[in-house]
Image (tube, grey):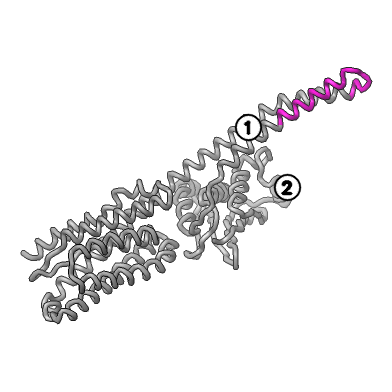
Amino acid sequence: MHFHLAMKEVLLNFFLILTPIYFFQFISTQRARNGQILLGIIAGLAAVLCMTFPIAYGNGFLWDLRWVAFVIAIIYGGWTAGGIAGVILLSYRMSLGGLASILNVTVVEVLLFIIFIVMRRWFHGLALKKKMQAGFIMAVLTFSLVLMAIMFHFWFMDNLGFFYKEGTNVFLLMGASYILSMLLFIYFSENIIRFTSLRETFHQTEKAHMVNELFVLFSYELKKPLGNVKESLEKIQLNTADASSAGHHKLAVNQLEEAQRVLSGYQSYSSNESGMKSGFFLLPAIEEIVEITSPYSHTKGVTVTYSLNQNIELTGDKIPFKQAILNILKNAIDATSKGGRVLIEAERSRNHVKLRVIDSGIGMTREVLRDIARSNGLSGSKFSGNGLHVAFEQVHKIGGYLSFDSEVDKGTVVTMKLPLA
């Protein structure tokens, strides 16, 4: 009977702990600071509701999942969200009274805050599978600390007999609840973040295509004024003694100014496309791109693998990087015959990382490599059709550069040198 009642309350706590997920799509689209504040408030309220509807087991032993909500706020919202959730949790506990319990909660809150602020950076550098494993460790660590705090409370109240009397069943249920709720939250929230990021990547890619199309239109617009300039200058050369040469010269200058205005407009628009510099971890970004291109690589019969350090963090905007690696990876797949392989690897140095995309494809001659280096992949060159101009542009945006090493019939190595955070 006690078990069935406890399970109902456990399920209620589960739904309360998962409350931030219901708003996660909205939170993840906000500015970083606003999102952290919202997450802190929602997680704090979830913790309060867990304390309001605790789980009763055995002879009046009460517990809840408030600490899972607190840890979630720290891991996904950092100092701001964790601090807000902690203030809400502690304020509500103080309103309930009991000096010993308040001191106990304060100590647990401070310890958890310190531990998980330190672990947060490491956690976000992991792939999803590793994050699930890390979530298990975090849940066990949280439960162990809370269990010690509960034991200390009963020892302080000189009632350890009641603590031991409850037996292992309640603590097994409590520990399992901590682990399951933590893993569920990580799984759902990471997938929401990933899908939101993929949608943003596609959106930014479409914007990049629109900029390229606008460049073509601007090129057509430039043809007329530049043609007029050429015609006017030719007339000046043929009629140097003619009194009207001054007028032709003036027209040439006016048309050049028109061409400059058009170019300035394009440069202004293009500069506004670059994102704010921040930072991102390399491994999750590569995983997303490999997943995006997996249907294409499977169709081509090409295997794409990667070997990367999970703690490499780059500076700059993630969107340009994804656009660049997407174009480079697609080119590598196209150049590789069925049954071939494409490898992505990284070599870290003091202040930068060399990311290499290595294919076993048809390769390029020295002449082609020279032409790529000279053109820098710019639109309008004979290599612009394969997306190299996009890759060059986007890599430059985050302060890196591209280089190529290739041999005919042996494959190509594209190296991106990128700044570390």
Up/down of 270 relative to 72, above or below: above
Report the residue marked by disc 1. 216
Q: Verify whether residue 349 appears in magenta.
A: no
Q: Is residue 68 left or right of residue 297?
A: left
Rendered residue at 57%/56% (across/down): 357
Up/down of 307 relative to 154, above or below: above
Report the residue marked by disc 2. 374
Q: Look at label 2 and name its amino acid.
A: Arg
Rendered residue at 81%/23% (across/down): 232
Q: At which x and y percent is residue 270?
A: 60, 39
Q: Secondary structure at mark 2?
A: helix
The answer, for residue 411, to whether it is visible in the render is no
Mark 1, mark 2: which one is toward the viewer? 1
Q: Look at label 1 and name its amino acid.
A: Val
Q: Looking at this view, is 61 or 352 the one in front?
A: 61
Q: At which x and y percent is residue 310?
A: 47, 64
Within-10-Å neighbours for mark 2: few <14, some 14–19, many 20+: few
Q: Are marks 1 and 2 in contact (CB under 8 Å)?
A: no
